[in-house]
Image (spheres, rainbow, N blue to C red):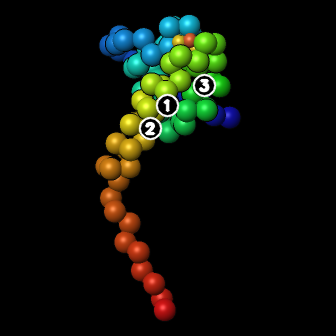
Amino acid sequence: MTIILITYTVSTMYVCICNRLKEDMIRSLAEQGLGFEEIQAITGCSSTCGTCRSYAEDLVLSVQLRAHQSLPLRVMTSSA
Ligand code: FES
């Protein structure tokens, strides 16, 4: 069973007006490791008119990139 927490405190701008989804909510889900398609399945983001899709995808991507930048570099070794 997967438990997904939807937490946000400060209301920011709407990302998806059709589904009343604000940036904090999308960001929170992305910070928990969900990709755009998973977020879309849970929230319905971009599933009505689709106008918000590129912004929502960019938002998720920016969260993912920020998460990767904070990870320590993995040292690659070879045994050749
Ligand atoms: S604004 Fe997101 S589906 Fe319409």
Amino acid type at image mark 1: Glu
Dividing the image into four equal quarters, which quarter contains ligand 1? top right
Q: Report the residue at 38% width, 44% height from top.
A: 65
| Residue that badge 2 annotates | 61
Distance from disc 2 to disc 1, alpha carbons, whole Å, reads 6 Å
Sooner in the amino-acid sequence: mark 2 or mark 3: 3
Disc assigned to residue 70: none
Q: Name the element at disc 2.
A: helix
Q: 61 or 3, which is in the foreground? A: 61
| Residue that badge 1 annotates | 57
Amino acid type at image mark 3: Gln
Neighbour class for label 2 at 10 Å: few (<14), some, many (≥20)?
A: some
Distance from disc 2 to disc 3, alpha carbons, whole Å, reads 14 Å
Ligand 1 within 8 Å of disc 3? The answer is no
Q: Quadrant of residue 28?
A: top left
Left or right placement of residue 23 versus residue 54 in this view: left
Q: Name the element at disc 1.
A: helix
